[in-house]
Amino acid sequence: LGAWPPDRVQLGVHALILRDHGYRCDEVVVYYATTKQRVRVAVNEQLVQETLEAIRGARQLSSSDIPPPLKDSPKCPQCSLVGICLPDETNVCAEEEEAEPETPGERRQLMLFDVDERRMRVGVKRRTREDVRRLVPARDDLRPVYLATQGLYVGKSGRVLQVKEKQKVVQEIRIHETCQVNVMGNIQLSTQAIQALCQAEVPIAYFSMGGWFYGVTHGLGVKNIFLRREQFRLADIPSFALRLARALVAGKIRNCRTMLQRNHLEPPRRALALMKCMQNDAESAESMEQLLGIEGNAARIYFEHFAGMIKVGRDEPVELVEEAQEVEASGTKSKPLDFDFSKRNRRPPRDPVNALLSLAYSLLAKDLTIVCQVAGFDPFLGFYHQPRFGRASLALDLMEPFRPLIADSAVLSAINTRMVTTEDFIRTSDSVALTPQGRKKFFRAYEQRMDTLVTHPLFGYRVNYRRILEIQTRLLARVLTGELTTYPVFTTR
Ligand code: SF4
């Protein structure tokens, strides 16, 4: 039995350091705990040369470009970096790019998903779904925490957060089982609690009582300065920013279209055809201004038909509808709240559906801000959304294709399953807000959506939406560091 090659080099480094400090070192010993074996290694010329060679190789590697991930390696499933490295996913995307080099004017970002057709054209062997191993768990064991009752105080005892109401402990949360803490409104956290969460790299997201996302506190986990350097460099290259923005907007339009096709009571054929054209236009937009116009028009059409996906309120008894109409006509009282929706309005939302949509987008922006920070990005510098003081532009960029799939879908599901009802809203002057109880119900609906397992269209494995947000953000990092040339936007069929 001998020591493994990497272990020999590590022992060699220790021996050289000891010798450098004036110690005599002729032999080193390694103990393998699993097999309970002690292995002796002689510190001879061969070990010294092996060690120096490995050090030279490591130095060369650190000064060169990032090497591509290993292909189908049995080492990857055990590697602690697998969730960051995404070896199979990066290799699949890179193979796609090699299989069909980009031709001028071609809109390749979106074509990545027309895999079968492209492979038939270029004669590439079809990669089966089994080729991409799902090396990351489908969903995280860690859970987000929402604190929404005003006046709560959060302290720390050992490794547990203690949530107190009027000095009585009402909830205990294990820090190591938590992935984020969301604080809505006037809730106090002790310094000890904040320190413990920062140390465990659990971000704390702050919202106003009404759900406006203010910011995040997190530990010192943002270490990938090389990625941020590339982000700042590439954000200043208009052609790169436009190429990425086209893909994100076209992906969003495609996902909005899919939502209408799947959920509308009578899918509006003309609107769907128009949106298809707009998706194509977005793919070839020549400027950011043009892209903004296309996105605005597509959003207008989508929200014109949004009401067709709301399936409650259509079977209300006639007397109730008549009563509501009378109240409205008399002008003596404000119109009773309902789930009627005509157009998107915000700041403040003026009806229950808009109140839910605003909260859902706020939660999604928060989640993508956190994912951007975890991946090493600066969430405030985007490619499509231009820099603006206090705006997490990159999070908003990445959010575009997910707005319909996560936020709108959570809203529709909360309404259509009657998880929230009109009783869960209050009207104040010309705005409508959720009651504290209604907010809690919607957090549940949003988290249910985030936890829904979906098949990744490119990689073929099933993971939940929270995991997909992280995978997509890390794929964007691959694009920025030059390992991939195009960003595969997430779209559903
Ligand atoms: S996951 Fe990445 S870093 Fe880890 S062994 Fe595989 S290729 Fe190497």
Image (cartoon, grey):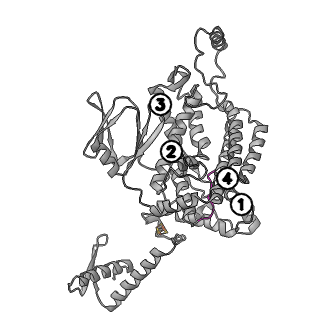
Cβ of mark 2 under 8 A from ligand 1: no
Say which mark, if any, is on residue 116: 1
In contact (CB < 8 Å): disc 4 and disc 2 = no
In contact (CB < 8 Å): disc 1 and disc 3 = no
The amino acid on which the numbered mark 1 sits, given as a three-letter code, is Asp
Q: Secondary structure at mark 4?
A: helix
Question: Cα distance, mark 4 to mark 2?
Answer: 24 Å
Residue 286 among magenta residues: no
Question: Which numbered disc flags the more N-terminal residue, 2 or 3?
Answer: 3
Q: Which residue is mark 4?
A: 246
Question: Which numbered disc flags the more N-terminal residue, 1 or 3?
Answer: 1
In the picture, measured across the screen, residue 159 lies left or right of residue 479, that is left
Camera-near label (4 vs 2) is 2
Say which mark, if any, is on residue 210: 3
The amino acid on which the numbered mark 2 sits, given as a three-letter code, is Phe
Q: Relative to residue 239, is residue 427 depicted above or below?
A: above
- Tell me the magenta residue range: 484-493
